[in-house]
Amino acid sequence: MNKLVLPGDILRARDAIAAIPKVDLGPPIEVPPIPEEAKPNGITDEEKQWLTREINRYVKERNALVLSHNYEIPDIQDVAKYKGDSIFLAQKGSESDADVIVEAAVLFMPQILAVMKKPHQIILAPSLNALCSLAAHADPNKIMDWKKDNPTGIVISYVNTYIEVKALSNYCCGSANAAKVIEHVAKTYPDSPLLFLPDVHLGFFAAKTLEEMGQSIDRLWLMMGACHVHNDIRPYHVDNARKQHPNAAIAVHPECGCTSSCMRQVQTGEIPLKLVGFRSTSGMFKYAEEIPQKEIIIATEVGNIYPLSKAVPSKTFIPANPDAVCAYMKQNTLRNLYESLRDMKYEITVDPELAKQARVPIERMLRIV
Ligand code: 13P
Ligand code: SF4
């Protein structure tokens, strides 16, 4: 009898990919409700203006920098100095000399800054509820067991992991440089087993990258993890959106539950190759600028559509699944961002020994872009 595969298990890539439909890839942690104040018109214009003014005042007074992920609510994106994907924010944050850096994102991102920070800097997060269902799948004990069984193995962890996992990793990558990091590792360690974690859909993408390099995927291992938001962007969402917008291009984040089916449909010619881009959160911006199509179906968290529409106003962006909303990202609000700067909370710190170990893969991630 086949062994039951559980979320977070580490399997050989072929077995992991075959197990995708059979494993519950739902959130392993509670998904909090979205605060009322994070919803459209959740606060009055008057309060918004007051909070924005106060945030800007504290930014000057405390010599602070505000960073926002692309999936944050528009109010937060508008007040931040920089908005972007996880790698861009890690770069901007670690280059900065500001005394205080507030990162409105999910907690593994300010953790990166807590590793990279200069001694005088304080790293803050507006909400401690900003977790991540994908990061929650990665159990450090399972990684340690894999390393024991594979002493020459190389661990590549996706940016959506907490510090304990990064400390066990040789390399980190974000969606923007996943393919480059995989290529680099595959060339640098031609004989080593490779473990990619925690996202099995992105793992499928890793397997394709190896195959495109002419390498066997026999040495690749994957973790059975997923982001519940991206996992719920299913093939039928893309099919339905294509029926309604037959001339639209499609931008697919490789964390999505539709990644493998879209790749297969491209291979079989059902979807013309020229109409599909597998792109990171930030890669979708360049894609939107370059692709001639006026309409683009977006398969990622819907928050990305706000900055896309601002950056490329001539295009129309259609969410593949309009319910693809990350409630963890939406725990950050203009109110708690203001309170964060006012009360200097919540300070994000990391154990110095873990920080030392995690710094190596993080620096590699920032170098290979
Ligand atoms: P990026 O690395 O693209 O910012 O993505 C992080 C994330 O949480 C994706 O859902
Ligand atoms: Fe995590 Fe998914 Fe939210 Fe990104 S969208 S922060 S992967 S739960």
Image (spheres, helix red, strand yellow):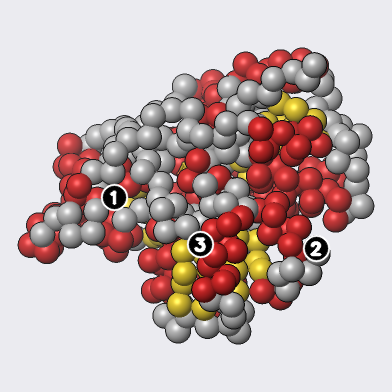
- Name the residue: 41% across, 53% down: 323
Q: Residues within 10 Å of mark 2 (few under 14, many from 20)?
A: few
Q: Quadrant of residue 328?
A: top left
What number is the disc on residue 320? 3
What number is the disc on residue 366? none
Q: Is tag 3's residue or tag 1's residue first in the polypeptide sequence?
A: 1
Question: Which residue carries the number 1 mark?
Answer: 64
- Name the residue: 37% across, 34% down: 31
CA separation in Å, label 3 and label 1: 37 Å
Q: Is residue 112 left or right of residue 340?
A: right
Q: Is tag 3's residue or tag 2's residue first in the polypeptide sequence?
A: 2
- As drawn, 327 above or below 299: above
Residue 236 drawn at (x, y percent): 58, 57
Question: Which residue carries the number 2 mark?
Answer: 267
Q: Is residue 169 left or right of residue 226?
A: right
- As drawn, 115 above or below 174: above
- Name the residue: 31% across, 56% down: 73
